[in-house]
Image: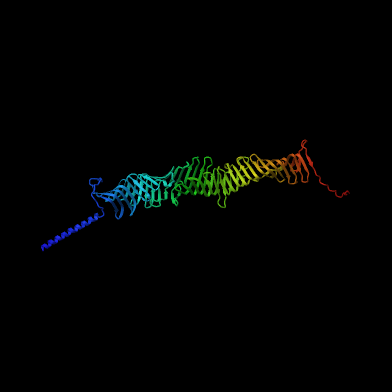
């Protein structure tokens, strides 16, 4: 019995030892079954302390690090050295860094040391982190991992992508949040924003934060953008990309946004706006919107060119479109104003509900304004509905709203027309059923009654001192009228010159103080209001209620009220008496309006009565009040009278004489 018990105990002990050996073998098999074959080698790795001794080397080693169930990073190396303290050192390393189970970054380095317990690693020497889209971050070394799952550069970092690159004082990324931050002064150069050979776009910022999951870049500490000699500054900005490392979809610049610099043509530019948004459009185009600058209420831009000309543009709200190379147009909305101050011209201001600036080669060349347009130039103004203004040639055209007319004016008067044009040099042309009024001329002797005018076209020159009217042109003041195909009115000298189908009407002082009206027709007229003289030339015809006189040239003298006092006629004078049919003809004549007679000279002067009677003399006078012709003869100035007696009638009751 006792021997059986001893045998049973020995068998139990043997089974226990055998079971323990099986468990130990199973543990060792699980522990080493994924390790590659090892072999003792000479290890050149230098231990960090006396306790760190290399124990084995792995060829073609792959290591995966996890935090819980989430992959942290995966290391592939040509060779790995395992140390006694559990550290690993890798050579020819490629690391995949994970965010939410997907590869977010790639890291390439010649060497890398890993602490698998703390899930930390650090590269030795130069290393490069790659993102999507061909974007890479290079530094003198990186540390990665830890509880925060960070990847951080040691010292300055450089970065690059397609058509852009830059440098920063340092870089740190978070695998947990999938973010990347550049700090210590960031500088980025983007050559894809300009054509080949043009200036690159440079972005400067103290710090840049990149949220890769949202494809959002933030400049929370300010941003400065440089291009050539132009600069844009803002206190805060955001760039929304189409995807991680994708193209720009939207850029938002916080207020205030300030622009200054020098354009390619040498013009100095300054601008200010509130929140500004730049949005990407199809076909590599962009759209800009800008709010008014805080504290000002306007989005403003002004520039001075090399000639000293100054321009300003401001609006309540600003929109525009362009490409990567240049802006095509900018439009002010709500209320827009443009001011043009040339060194040799009066300041000119344009105001409208909408105003669009059109650019060529980066330069503003035209402005198109619509709705409630007003143009001010010096003391002159104009109002309409649509303005097309050339900033290069300083020309413009202004048209009214449907059913309305363009209005323009100055302290001296008003004008209405169907279209207004500004010509290079400063002349202003009104077209289409032009009507208007002017205050009296500059000469102190002129009347205060306004001068009115009408024509098909009216041109104001010399700042409005000269007015040219064409197409059934008319000038009138009270009852006095000048009409011609073309009228030139010099307001500085108060002289009117008319050409083509001239017709004038004016008062004439009559004998006894009764007033009459004198009409004159000719091919040309020159009226000197200040000098009180009027000259008619070419088929002149003078009419009043009593007679019509014709000649080739007429010189009239006017009194201070513009009434005709005398008229000297020359060049084949002919005078017709309306009442009797009498006709007087000679070489020259004088019409004494107040005395009421014509004095005629000729070689000879011929008077023809309706009944055929004639008078010939070298000098005679027709006294119209008594309808008497007086021959002013002398011994050396003979006269001749042809008298045709009328046939007498027989006396009533007298016997008729037989033949």
Q: Residue furthest left?
A: 2
Q: Residue furthest top?
A: 636
Q: Nearer the viewer, residue 333 or 508?
A: 333
Query: Where does residue 440 sit, x and y in percent of width and height?
Result: 61, 43
- In which quadrant will I find the N terminus? bottom left
**Looking at the image, is 33 positioned above or below residue 465?**
below
Left or right: 397 in relation to 84: right
Q: Residue furthest bottom?
A: 1
Q: How many marks?
A: 0
Q: Is residue 146 visible?
A: no
Q: Is residue 488 visible?
A: yes
Tell me the quarter of the picture where residue 261 sits. Answer: top left
Tell me the quarter of the picture where residue 68 sits. Answer: bottom left
Q: Nearer the viewer, residue 163 or 326?
A: 163
Left or right: 373 in relation to 80: right
Left or right: 70 in relation to 543: left
Query: Where does residue 541 sit, x and y in percent of width and height?
Result: 69, 44
What's the coloring here?
rainbow
Query: Where does residue 128 sit, x and y in percent of width and height?
Result: 34, 47
**Looking at the image, is 71 positioned above or below residue 300?**
below
Query: Where does residue 73 sit, x and y in percent of width and height?
Result: 31, 52
């Amino acid at each position: 019995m006792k021997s059986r018990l001893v045998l049973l105990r020995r068998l139990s002990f043997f089974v226990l030892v055998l079971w323990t050996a099986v468990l130990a073998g199973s543990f060792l098999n699980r522990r080493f079954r994924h390790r590659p074959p090892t072999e003792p080698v000479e290890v050149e790795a230098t231990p960090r302390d006396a306790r760190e001794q290399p124990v084995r080397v792995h060829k073609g080693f792959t290591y995966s690090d996890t935090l819980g169930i989430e992959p942290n990073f995966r290391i592939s190396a040509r060779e790995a050295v395992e140390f006694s303290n559990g550290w690993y050192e890798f050579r020819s390393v490629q690391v995949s860094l994970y965010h939410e189970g997907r590869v977010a970054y790639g890291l390439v380095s010649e060497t890398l040391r890993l602490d698998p317990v703390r899930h930390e690693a650090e590269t030795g020497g130069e290393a490069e982190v790659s993102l999507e889209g061909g974007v890479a971050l290079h530094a003198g070394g990186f540390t990665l991992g830890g509880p925060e799952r960070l990847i951080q550069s040691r010292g300055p970092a450089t970065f690059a992508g397609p058509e852009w690159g830059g440098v920063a004082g340092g870089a740190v990324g978070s695998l947990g949040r999938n973010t990347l931050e550049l700090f210590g002064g960031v500088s980025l150069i983007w050559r894809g924003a300009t054509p080949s050979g043009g200036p690159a776009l440079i972005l400067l910022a103290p710090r840049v934060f990149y949220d890769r999951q949202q494809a959002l870049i933030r400049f929370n500490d300010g941003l400065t953008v440089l291009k050539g000699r132009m600069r844009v500054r803002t206190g805060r900005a955001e760039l929304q990309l189409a995807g991680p490392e994708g193209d720009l979809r939207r850029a938002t610049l916080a207020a205030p946004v300030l622009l200054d610099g020098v354009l390619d043509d040498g013009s100095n530019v300054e601008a200010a706006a509130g929140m500004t948004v730049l949005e990407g459009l199809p076909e590599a185009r962009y759209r800009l919107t800008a709010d008014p600058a805080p504290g000002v209420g306007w989005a403003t831009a002004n520039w001075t060119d090399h000639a000293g000309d100054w321009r300003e543009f401001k609006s309540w709200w600003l929109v525009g479109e362009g490409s990567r190379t240049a802006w095509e147009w900018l439009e002010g909305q709500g209320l827009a104003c443009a001011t043009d101050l040339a060194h040799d011209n009066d300041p000119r201001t344009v105001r409208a509900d909408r105003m669009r600036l059109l650019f060529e080669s980066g330069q503003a060349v035209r402005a198109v304004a619509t709705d409630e347009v007003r143009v001010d130039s010096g003391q002159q103004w104009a109002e309409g509905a649509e303005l097309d203004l050339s900033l290069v040639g300083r020309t413009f055209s202004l048209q009214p709203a449907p059913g309305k007319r363009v209005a323009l004016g100055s302290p001296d008067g008003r004008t209405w027309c169907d279209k207004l044009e500004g010509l290079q040099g400063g002349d202003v042309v009104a077209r289409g059923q032009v009507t208007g009024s002017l205050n009296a001329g500059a000469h102190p002797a002129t009347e205060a009654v306004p001068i009115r005018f009408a024509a098909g076209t009216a041109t104001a020159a010399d700042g409005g001192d000269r007015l040219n009217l064409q197409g059934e042109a008319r000038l009138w003041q009270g009852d006095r009228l000048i009409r011609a195909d073309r009228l030139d009115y010099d307001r500085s000298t108060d002289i009117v010159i008319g050409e083509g189908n001239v017709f004038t009407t004016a008062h004439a002082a009559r004998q006894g103080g009764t007033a009459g009206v004198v009409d004159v027709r000719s091919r040309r007229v020159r009226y000197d209001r200040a000098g009180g003289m009027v000259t008619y030339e070419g088929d002149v015809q003078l009419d009043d209620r009593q007679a019509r006189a014709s000649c080739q040239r007429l010189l009239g003298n006017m009194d201070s009220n513009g009434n005709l006092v005398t008229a000297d006629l020359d060049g084949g004078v002919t005078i017709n008496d309306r009442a009797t049919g009498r006709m007087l003809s000679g070489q020259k004549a004088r019409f004494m309006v107040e005395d009421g007679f014509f004095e005629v000279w000729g070689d000879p002067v011929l008077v023809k009565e309706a009944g055929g009677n004639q008078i010939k003399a070298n000098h005679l006078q027709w006294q119209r009040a008594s309808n008497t012709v007086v021959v002013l003869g002398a011994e050396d100035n003979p006269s001749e009278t042809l008298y045709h007696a009328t046939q007498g009638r027989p006396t009533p009751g007298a016997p008729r004489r037989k033949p």
